Amino acid sequence: MTRIKNAQQFASQHAIYIVLLLLVVGIAFWDPRFLSVTTIRDIFLQSSTRAIIALGAAFILITGGVDLSAGRVVGLTAVLSASMLQLSEYPRKFFPDLQQLPLWVPVLLAIAAGLIVGLINGFIVSKFSVPPFIATLGTMVAVYGLNSIYFDMEPNQSQPIGGLREDFSRLGTGYIGPNGPYSVPYIVIIAIAVALLVWILFNKTRLGKNMYAIGGNIQAAKVSGINVSRNLIAIYAIAGALYGLAGVLEAARTGGATNNYGNMYELDAIAACVVGGVSTSGGIGTVPGIMAGVLIFGVINYGLTFIGVNPYWQLIIKGLIIVLAVAFDMRKYVSKK
């Protein structure tokens, strides 16, 4: 009896990793080529920017909020960075007279733009008590409008931005090691570094402890002396900066940008977080769980396409996984209450 309880407890605590393993084993059973090094490398490559966005969204979810502006911030920062990092000889430059800038200048400007949007979100939520859903819905629409105006400026006039510099593209397509399946892409290394940094913020800093406290019980957090407003502004700002970084890397990875980049990415990020164990009620969430959630959707997207499953069936499977994850989360929440 004790062994059964221990097994049930283990399965409950590690459900996300078990699901990930079963997905990989199931697809590999259907087509053993799925376990090739190249396939696994491609899944990690495609999941890297999504992981950074999900880590940013997790900050907000753990406080009990939700951020709908993430995808549009990704689009804005992708366009901003790409527009300033084109080849000097490219015939359709966004800024024809712009001199070549050091790589870090446009990258930092784009990340700063994401951070500013996050600051605005945090200020609206904390100072005006606007529900996060409404506040970020408003900024989502406004950021898309602002990005579209910028994208439509002369002489670009809403044409896809291309002709990116090699040093910029290398961020998304370069790798360490010999050319081949065993090379490690820079973008994967960046995503892992961001995950480690976020893990430290979550677990080893006062901001992280305050974040969990606010999500667990905001009134108790106020009574205990936590400056909720200041912490929320900082949390939303960090999330915005992560979206900005993801936008830069997405432009570098794909070799271009348009104002529609990042559309609906926020929903994928929220879904990955929820599937990865971040509670929709706030106060609960871990970095390993979030990364596993991102990989589950990466395996679904890549793996089911790999074995020829109709894309519409893939959407149904993803939807069922999201609903089951939220139902499981709410069941645990109700049990604790």
Image: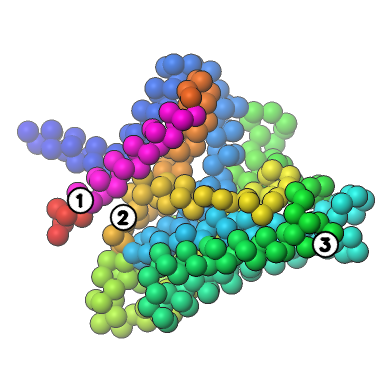
Q: Earlier in the sequence, mark 2 or mark 1?
A: 2
- Membership of 322 in magenta stretch: yes
- Which disc is residue 154 wearing? 3
Q: CA distance from mark 3 to mark 2?
A: 45 Å
Q: Which residue is mark 2?
A: 279
Name the element at disc 2. Answer: loop
Name the element at disc 1. Answer: helix
- Front of the two marks 3 and 2: 3
Q: CA distance from mark 2 to mark 1?
A: 9 Å
Relative image position of residue 1 (x, y in whole percent): 7, 33
Residue count near mark 1 (Cα–Cα under 10 Å), binned few <14, some 14–19, many ≥20: few
Q: CA distance from mark 1 to mark 3?
A: 54 Å
For the residues labelled 2 and 1, say whether their Cβ atoms are less than 8 Å apart: yes
For the residues labelled 1 and 3, say whether their Cβ atoms are less than 8 Å apart: no
Q: Note whether 6 is above or below 210 in the view shown.
A: above
Query: Which residue range is magenta in the image?
Result: 311-332
The residue type indicated by label 2 comes to Ser
- Which disc is residue 332 wearing? 1
Q: Note whether 305 is above or below 147 in the view shown.
A: above
Relative image position of residue 131 (x, y in whole percent): 37, 70
Residue 80 position by quadrant = bottom right
Residue count near mark 3 (Cα–Cα under 10 Å), binned few <14, some 14–19, many ≥20: few
Relative image position of residue 238 (x, y in whole percent): 52, 67
In which quadrant of the rendered image does the C terminus lie? Answer: bottom left
The residue type indicated by label 1 comes to Lys
Whether residue 330 is visible? yes
Residue at image x 45%, y 38%?
Answer: 297
On the picture, is 100 further left or further right than 324?
A: right
